[in-house]
Structure formats: C-alpha cells, structure tokens
Image (cartoon, rainbow, N blue to C red):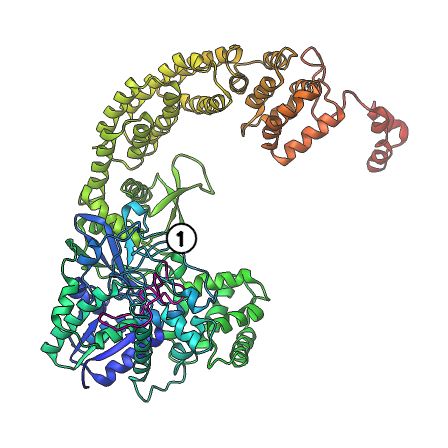
C-alpha cells in the first residue's frame, strides 16, 4: 500500500460498509483512522464488548452545560462501525480524527437555536454517496455533510426533512444541509438545531443527507455559488441522467455485487471512482457552501500526518467521501494550524448510549438520516437472496397482524419485484420495487397494511444496547439500576403500561416515572386508562428516545440518585414559585412521586402563598389539585395531614369570598368562574371534614342561585348542583327556571341560565328527558323569544344542546315534536312519563286482544274479562 488508504464512504450505507470491510481485508493496514470526535478514542474498546448491540451513538456533552450535547450515531451497517469492529478484531490501533467535540460544542451557531456539534459542513462521502439517505456520523461539524456525514458525525434532532422519494433537481437540492452530529439542547425541548434541522443554521440535507458541501481546505475551487450548499450526490446523479439521487446511489453502490456472493475484483475500485468524482466536484464548487468543513479537514490532516509518522503509510482513513480530496491534498502544517487557531473550547465528556432505527430515519429530524434503516440493515445482514428474504419477513409481519398471506403471495411478490426492476432498467430490485410488489400482491393495492410494513420493517423499532460498564453520570447509573430492579426496560416502541398501585412493584414503577417527570425526563406520559378508573389505577404511555440520555445528564446537577435529584429540584421550585397554582401543582406531584423530604418545604410554601393570595378565582383553581392530593394518603400510605389543613383553610376562604366575586362578571369571566365552581364542588367532598364543609358550601350555592347580580350561567349552575345533590326540590328548581326564563329577563341572560343549568357533560340532557316540566319551560321560553333576539341566543343554545349524546338529542326532539305534557309549567299537576301520551288509548289496547286469545287459548269473553 503506497500512501494512506482513503476510504470515502456514505454514513449508514450498507454498500459502503461492505466495501470498507473488503478494502481493509485486502490492505491489512497498521492503523485505522475514522472521522469522529477524538474524545471517543477511550471508548472504542467497548465496541467489541458482547453487550454492545448497535444502533448506538457516542454522546458528548459540555460538563458545565449538559444540555449542550451531540450524538454520533452508528448502526450495524455504518462503514465506521464496520471499520471499528475490524480494527478491534485484528488488534489494529483505531482512532478518531475529526475536530474534537470540545470545539464543536463550544461553537455558537449562526442564528441556530442550538450549538452545532460538528464543524461546518461534514461533507462525508457518505452524504455524497448518501442520496439513499444515509446518516452521517463523521465528526462534529455543520449539518451540511453532502459526502456522507458518517456515523461519527453528530446528528441534528430537529424538524423532519422532505418526504422520502420526492426527487428534486440538483440545483434545488443544493441548499441541503448535510448529515452531522445530532444537537440536543435543553432549551430546545429535546431537539437542538435551527428550524431546518441544521446545527449550523443552514438548511437540512434531503434524502441523501448532504450536509457539508464539496470543498476542501486549500482547494482551488472554481465557481463557488454564493450562499448555496451543494448536494454532491444530487449533482452526480443528475450528471448520470437520474432524476432521483436516491435511486442512482442504490444502483451504483447498494446493488453492486448484492446477493451474488461474489466480491469486487478490485476492492479499492469503488473508493477510487468516488474519490475522483468528489475531486471533480470540489474543483468546480470549492467548499460548496460548507466553509466550516475547512476547519475540520485541517484538523484531520494534522491527525493523519501524526499517524503516518507513527505507523508509516500503511494507514487507512474512513471518512465521508466529500473529505477525501481535502485529505489527499498537500498542505503545510502551518497553514492547517492557522485555520485551527483561536477555536472556542469547552470541557466535554463522552459516553456510549443506545440509539434507535427510528432516530436514524430522516423523518425524525436527524440531519444525516436515512429513509429506510430497517431495509438497509436487512441488505447488510442478508447473506444472499435479499429480495426473497425480505418478502418472507413482510409475509411474517402481515400474518402476525391477521392478514391472509400465503407462500404463493411471497413467490409472486418476488417475481413482480424482479420484473419491475427489469422494466425500470435497474440492475436489481430495490426498495421501491419491493414496496410496489408488496402493495400489489400482499396488500391488495391498499396502503393501510403497507404503512404497517413501512413502520415495522422499513424503518423498524430496533433499540441498541451498551455495556453496563460504559461511562455514565451517577444519576444515569441509578436510573439503570432501578430500571433493572423494577423490570421496566426502555423500549423504542411506544407501549402502554397499566399499574395497580396496591402492588409494590407497580407502586415502585409509578414513583420512578413521576420522579423522572419532575426532572424533565419524560420517558412516560400519563394516559387515560381503559379499565378501572379507581385511584389505585394508573396508565402510562412509555417510549424511550435517545435524547432522554441528555435530559438525565442535565438532571444530574440536582443529585446523584433519582430520589435525591427529584427532591432537590422540587424544593428549589417550591421556594422560587410565586403563584399559588404552581405550588399546588408541585404538592400534587410531590405526593405522586413520594418525596417525603421535599413535602414539608412544599407545604410551607403552599401555606405562605395561600395566606397571601386574595384572588378567589386563584384559590378556587388551587383547591381541586389539593383535594386530589389528599386521596394519595389512602392509596400510597402518605401522611397528608398538613395538606388537609391547608386545603380546609382554602375552602373556608372560598366560601366567604365566592358570592361577592361572582358579581359583575362579563361572559368570559363568568364562564371561567363556572369552571372553578365545578372544581370546588367536586373537591369539597374529598376534604378531611367533608360533612361540615359540604353544608357550608351548599349554603354558598343557594346564595348564588338567587343572587340577582350573579351572571345567569353561574346562577343556573348553582341551581343544578343543588338539584343533583338532592338539596333542591324539583318544584323549587322549576320555579327558579320559570323566574330565569320570565319575560322580564333578557333573552341572552336567560340562555346563559339554561347553559349553566343543563349544559356541560353532567347529564343535563337526561334531566330534560326525565323531567318534562323543565323541558316544557325551556320549550315555551324558546318559542316566545322575539325574532330580533333569537339570532343572539341561538349560538349559545346550539353550543349547549350539541354537547348531548345523539340518543339524548333524538329523544328530546321526539318529546318536543309531540308537545311535552308539562308544557304549561310547574302549575301542571300531572306528572307525565317520558315517551308516553297523557292517557290510555283504549282502541290501540284492544288491538292486541286477538293475539292474546290465540296465545292463551281462551275465548273472547274470557279474554275480555282478563282485559277488564
């Protein structure tokens, strides 16, 4: 081997991965250099550990700001991963040579929402070769890595890219920001770059993941488009006559020697051809709009020189194809060091973390994402006949989902895929051909089962694993220990978890999930359960995302265990909270998470805020949360005596201040207060001295029901709550309704009273169905509303009655059509039965006599006697 072996790859490309393995086997280099952050060198031996299962990622974060972080993902079919495993298996030194994460994390993006974890433009060949949508893990740089930002490139977790399979001309795709490290930042809500998903503020790369444009340091590039980022793969595909860069990449790389069992006669041929193509592009486009690539490439050249001094020319370099011309170019050490002078730097830490196929997919926002990580993994792992094996996988999935698929379907789907490849002039059937064949043969032309195939197989829910002894912050280790002891394994696939808090194991899982939520690690989200609604039941929706490792690192500033960290954070938030609602929410969360040491601090803050707050609406808003918290003393054996005292005092102040607070409210204020009244009414029964407080509360409701200055919606609601509790007789309720709907009341105010009385989800429709006197009052009032006022009250009434169940609305319509028996109002003496007329229809009753005679076998005289 004369000179270093430069292997330009596409990140997450199985074709590149196979070619790298063949080239390394042929060359047997003395050292392997890989595009990636040098801080990861100490972690490389873990790649050979039996517990290590890709996809995984290198996670780097700033020590003083864990939210400033980046990932370098690696899949089983990533060329960099193959090179690492080859070097470890052959006992050959392996090193990362890209710009250190310490510099990448320190760089402030130009207008981006989060700092990029990779120097500008990681033009890895993989991006270049990456039309197929490879992910680029090659060194932290800008997300514009057209030449294949390799698995060592940090990734940008942001908005999804363009839909897969939408071909665009190279000129239009030239603005793609490529694959690179995935930035994560706490203030970005779990994602980290600008809106386009490019950590350096540039637009995202498209299907090929091109992030860094062609352009090496010191290259004498000719035409350098101003403010344009080149997508090398799209340019090469267009030059080859393809309108789809993804298809071109598959034809020239992924299909090369696939499934034939044969190897390349020249193992270096693909890299030589790709390097020449990249050289031509960089001569034409310079750095292609990815100017920060120049810094990264200068650092890589310095590292390459040092390796050549140590190992000679028998060195292999695996990097994005876009960087190959820059690494082959002869520059001086002084010139390269000048480019690196003055770079900002932070102290960074790095570890391995599990990754997922779903996060490798482009739609997840990963700058170097690929459309089909599951398909690429299949291509890499299949020893032969990849199409036949793929169709068998699809058939198995569809059968598991109760779709009728036979072996004949598989045979015909394979034939159709091969035929489509021939018709389309492709060397072998690719993903588009297999997808079309599956749709036509196995899915009967429907995209519904096909979406399942795309989700489960084309993308997949594979979650990697890392060794237990991988470096991690203490909080992460404690979390992992609890996950093992509770048998609560992180999974990439979303699932529901039903918990019975009466069981110790389920109670422990609930505590852990609530504590993590307090720390901002939203592994689980509470969900509505399908079963029992008792307080001892909880339902969670779980899904582990790689970004949660960053959230755990951020939360590490609060403590070394989940319990201590959650306690410290709650205490800090309680002392800093200024609003009563914030403290009551903290109290509820504190009880759910069972933080006994934090509870006294929260209770003190709650009592102080409650004593100082004079706004009745805020007091009423806080009481339901406290009442809910009181239930946890029964379910979780938590002492809530102090909380009960605060809640009782809050309820007393609400009872005193509520009637005056309900006077003079506008429509919006009245609607808001009505909601508070409903909440307080439900909370009163949960207080420690519920009997005494219930009587006090009902007295307040009576005042509101007859208070002329209170809005109609509040008066109607108070009357309804009293009626539901049996504290208001039906005759009295009818009298209040008659007064509210009298001609002296403005139509809008009367409609508001009706909304308060029968509106909402509290069974108001059934009340009207079963009490035709009330329905008659409403009907009589509505028919008497003047025409000029009818248009004003109609929207309010429609909103009220449209909330009823369809069956209730239908019954009410029938009753109104017949004319309610009690239409005359409360003075009517007869109580009609809903759905029946006012008296017996003897003619209709006699019509059943002949049938009864036949059934009973008696004569007409006897039957007449029975009827009488």
The single residue placed furthest to the bottom in the displayed view is 265
Give the SS element for disc 1: loop
How many residues crowd around disc 1 within 10 Å: few (fewer than 14), some, or many (20 or more)? few
Q: Is residue 732 magenta?
A: no
Tell me the quadrant of the picture where the C terminus can be found. top right
Q: Quadrant of residue 616?
A: top left
Q: Which residues are magenta?
A: 203-230
- Kindly report the secondary structure that dominates the magenta region of the rendered protein: loop
Residue 682 seen in render: yes
Out of 442 and 428, give the one closest to the viewer.
428
Q: Say which residue appears at 36% left-offset and 21% top-offset.
A: 619
Percent position of residue 103, x then y: 18, 58
656 to 36, vertically: above or below:
above
Percent position of residue 275, x then y: 30, 78
Left or right: residue 422 compared with residue 276: right
Q: Which residue is mark 1?
A: 494
């Amino acid at each position: 081997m004369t000179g270093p072996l430069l292997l330009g790859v596409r990140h997450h490309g199985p074709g590149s991965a196979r070619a790298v393995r063949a080239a390394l086997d042929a060359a047997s280099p003395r050292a392997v250099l890989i595009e990636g952050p040098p801080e990861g060198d100490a972690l490389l031996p873990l790649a050979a550990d039996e517990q290590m299962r890709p996809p995984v990622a290198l996670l780097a974060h700033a020590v003083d700001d864990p939210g400033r972080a980046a990932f370098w993902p690696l899949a089983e079919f990533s060329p960099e991963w193959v090179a690492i495993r080859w070097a470890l298996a052959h006992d050959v030194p392996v090193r990362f040579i890209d710009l250190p994460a310490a510099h990448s994390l320190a760089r402030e993006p130009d207008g981006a929402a989060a700092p990029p974890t990779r120097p500008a433009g990681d033009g890895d060949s993989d991006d270049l070769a990456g039309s197929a949508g490879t992910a680029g893990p090659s060194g932290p740089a800008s997300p514009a890595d057209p030449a294949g930002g390799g698995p060592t490139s940090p990734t940008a977790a942001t908005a999804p890219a363009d839909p897969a399979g939408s071909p665009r001309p190279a000129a239009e795709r030239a603005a793609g920001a490529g694959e690179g490290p995935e930035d994560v930042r706490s203030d970005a809500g779990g994602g980290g770059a600008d809106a386009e998903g490019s950590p350096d503020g540039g637009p995202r790369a498209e299907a090929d993941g091109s992030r860094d444009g062609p352009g090496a340091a010191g290259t004498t590039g000719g035409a350098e488009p101003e403010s344009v980022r080149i997508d090398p793969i799209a340019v090469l595909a267009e030059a080859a006559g393809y309108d789809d860069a993804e298809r071109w990449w598959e034809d020239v790389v992924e299909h090369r020697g696939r499934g034939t069992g044969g190897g390349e006669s020249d193992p270096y041929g693909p890299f030589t051809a790709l390097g020449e193509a990249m050289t031509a592009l960089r001569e034409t486009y310079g750095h292609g709009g990815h100017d920060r690539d120049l810094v990264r490439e200068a650092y890589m050249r310095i590292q390459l020189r040092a390796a050549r001094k140590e190992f000679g020319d028998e060195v292999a370099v695996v990097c994005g194809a876009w960087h190959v011309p820059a690494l082959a170019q002869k520059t001086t050490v002084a010139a390269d060091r000048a480019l690196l002078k003055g770079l900002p730097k932070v102290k960074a830490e790095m570890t391995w973390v599990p990754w997922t196929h779903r996060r490798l997919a482009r739609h997840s926002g990963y700058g170097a994402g690929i459309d089909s990580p599951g398909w690429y993994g299949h291509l890499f792992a299949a020893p032969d006949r990849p199409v036949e094996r793929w169709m068998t996988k699809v058939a198995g999935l569809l059968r598991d989902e109760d779709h009728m698929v036979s072996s004949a379907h598989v045979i015909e789907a394979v034939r159709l895929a091969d035929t489509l490849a021939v018709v389309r002039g492709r060397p072998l059937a690719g993903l588009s051909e297999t997808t079309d064949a599956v749709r036509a043969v196995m899915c009967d032309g429907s995209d519904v089962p096909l979406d399942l195939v795309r989700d489960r197989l084309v993308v997949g829910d594979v979650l990697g694993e890392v060794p237990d002894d991988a470096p991690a912050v203490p909080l992460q280790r404690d979390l992992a220990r609890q996950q093992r002891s509770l048998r609560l394994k992180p999974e990439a696939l979303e699932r529901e978890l039903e918990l019975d808090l009466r069981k110790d194991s389920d109670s422990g899982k609930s505590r852990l999930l609530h504590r993590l939520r307090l720390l901002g690690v939203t592994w689980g989200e509470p969900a509505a359960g399908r079963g029992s609604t008792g307080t001892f039941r909880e339902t969670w929706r779980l899904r582990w995302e790689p970004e949660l490792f960053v959230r755990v690192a951020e939360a590490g500033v609060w403590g070394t265990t989940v319990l201590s960290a959650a306690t410290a954070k709650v205490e800090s938030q309680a002392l800093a909270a200024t609003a009563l609602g914030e403290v009551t929410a903290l109290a509820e969360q504190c009880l759910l998470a069972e933080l006994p040491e934090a509870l006294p601090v929260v209770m003190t803050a709650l009592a102080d805020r409650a004593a100082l707050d004079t706004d009745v609406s805020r007091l009423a808003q806080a009481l339901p949360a406290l009442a809910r918290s009181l239930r946890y003393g029964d379910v979780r054996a938590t002492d809530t005596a102090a909380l009960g005292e605060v809640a009782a005092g809050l309820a007393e102040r609400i009872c005193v201040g509520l009637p005056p607070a309900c006077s003079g409210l506008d429509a919006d204020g009245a609607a808001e207060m009505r909601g508070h009244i409903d909440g307080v009414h439900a909370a009163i029964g949960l207080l420690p001295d519920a009997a005494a407080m219930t009587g006090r509360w009902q007295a307040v409701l009576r005042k509101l029901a007859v208070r002329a200055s209170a809005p109609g919606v509040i008066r109607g609601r108070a009357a309804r709550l009293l009626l539901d509790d049996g504290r208001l007789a039906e005759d009295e309720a009818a009298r209040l309704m008659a007064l509210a709907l009298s001609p002296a009341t403005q139509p809008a105010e009367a409609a508001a009273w009706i909304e308060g009385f029968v509106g909402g989800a509290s069974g108001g429709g059934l009340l009207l169905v079963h009490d035709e006197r009330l329905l008659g009052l409403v009907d009589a009032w509505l028919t008497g509303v003047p025409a000029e006022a009818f248009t004003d009250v109609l929207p309010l009434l429609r909103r009220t009655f449209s909330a009823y169940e369809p069956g209730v609305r239908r019954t009410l319509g029938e009753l109104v059509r017949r004319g309610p028996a009690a239409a005359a109002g409360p003075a009517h003496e007869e109580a009609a039965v809903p759905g029946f007329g006012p008296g017996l229809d003897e003619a209709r009753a006699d019509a059943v006599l002949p049938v009864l005679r036949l059934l009973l076998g008696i004569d007409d005289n006897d039957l007449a006697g029975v009827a009488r």
